[in-house]
Image: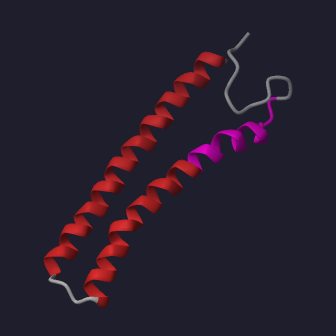
């Protein structure tokens, strides 16, 4: 008997959309949180640069901060995916 595959119904072999949605919603929330956190330095960059006319060095520092948040957030999302994949393999 072949091992069961995640996201497929074992009886019919059809794609299990309920399980796909159950797994994709937490992942989408995690990606949205990382994106929202990355918008904070970019919003500050806009406010300080455009509205208040601060020195461009602050804009560069805030741009680097946003890129750092995105890089770390991407790592966290990838770690979540790997850990969740191992959990799914152990469950099946």
Name the residue: 85% across, 28% down: 12
Viewer-side residue, 59 vs 74:
59
Q: Relative to residue 74, is residue 59 depicted above or below?
A: below
Q: Relative to residue 79, is residue 39 depicted above or below?
A: below
The image position of residue 10, as x and y in percent, is: 79, 23
Viewer-side residue, 51 vs 63:
51
Left-right relation of 58 to 52 = left
Tell me which secondary structure the magenta stretch mostly adopts: helix
Left-right relation of 41 to 24 = left
The image position of residue 32, as x and y in percent, is: 53, 57
Q: Relative to residue 7, is residue 41 depicted above or below?
A: below
Which segment is the magenta one?
A: 13-28
- Would residue 92 be counted in the magenta stretch? no
The image position of residue 48, as x and y in percent, is: 27, 81
Left-right relation of 21 to 62 = right
Name the residue: 22% across, 89% down: 53
Which quadrant would the C terminus be assigned to in this image? top right
């Amino acid at each position: 008997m072949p091992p069961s595959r995640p996201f497929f119904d074992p009886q019919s072999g059809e794609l299990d959309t309920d399980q796909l949605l159950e797994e994709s919603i937490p992942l989408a929330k995690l990606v949205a949180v990382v994106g929202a956190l990355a918008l904070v330095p970019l919003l500050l960059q806009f406010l300080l640069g455009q509205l208040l006319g601060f020195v461009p060095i602050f804009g560069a520092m805030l741009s680097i901060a946003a890129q750092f948040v995105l890089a770390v957030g991407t790592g966290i999302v990838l770690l979540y995916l790997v850990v969740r994949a191992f959990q799914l393999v152990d469950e099946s």
